[in-house]
């Protein structure tokens, strides 16, 4: 995120609640993110907050788009609705959805990472 965040802006980051230990993890994440960009007064990253995704439309949309990208990269087939969403996103973004975009992409920023097999 260091490359994406601008020191002239102020950010609020919202994360879907996943477990009961989330509050401790979010505080640590806020500290790590702020320290990584020398934002010790927490003026650039103002807030990192847990929310319930089913209550926030933007997070529901994020889940949908993440699902589209996951569907493409797992090379799944057979679901006409998902395939229609994949085609639409590829048409609108002009990206294959399989490769990393430029770090400063404004609308959709994709980071493709493949874990290497463990060496025996």
Image: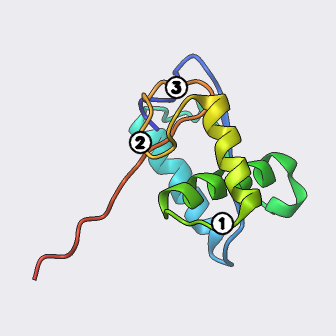
**Does label 3 or label 2 sit earlier along the sequence?**
2
**Residue beneath the point at 30% across and 64% down:** 115
**Residue beneath the point at 52% across and 54% down:** 29
Badge 1 element: helix
Residue nearest the viewer, comparing 2 with 82: 82
Please state which of the two labelled residues, at mark 3 or mark 1, is closer to the viewer.
Answer: 3
Residue 56 percent across, percent down from the top left: 86, 52
Q: Which residue is mark 1?
A: 23
Residue 1 percent across, percent down from the top left: 46, 38
**Residue beneath the point at 55% across and 66% down:** 76
Residue 11 percent across, percent down from the top left: 65, 33
**Mark on residue 99?**
2
Label 2 and label 1: CA atoms lie apart by 33 Å
In this image, 55 relative to 111: left or right? right
**Does label 2 or label 1 sit earlier along the sequence?**
1
Q: Which residue is mark 3?
A: 105
Label 3 and label 1: CA atoms lie apart by 30 Å
The chosen color scheme is: rainbow
Please state which of the two labelled residues, at mark 2 or mark 1, is closer to the viewer.
Answer: 2
Residue nearest the viewer, comparing 34 with 70: 70
Q: Is residue 114 above or below residue 48?
A: below
**Residue at the extreme bottom of the image, as rendered:** 120
């Amino acid at each position: 995120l260091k490359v994406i965040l601008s020191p002239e802006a102020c950010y609020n980051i919202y994360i879907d609640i996943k477990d009961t230990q989330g509050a401790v993890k979010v505080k640590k994440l806020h500290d790590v993110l702020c320290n990584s960009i020398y934002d010790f007064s927490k003026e650039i990253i103002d807030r990192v907050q847990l929310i319930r995704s089913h209550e926030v439309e933007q997070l529901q949309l994020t889940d949908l788009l993440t699902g589209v990208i996951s569907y493409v990269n797992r090379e799944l087939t057979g679901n006409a609705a998902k395939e229609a969403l994949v085609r639409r996103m590829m048409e609108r973004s002009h990206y294959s959805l399989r490769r990393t975009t430029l770090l400063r992409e404004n609308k959709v920023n994709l980071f493709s990472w493949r874990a290497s097999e463990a060496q025996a």
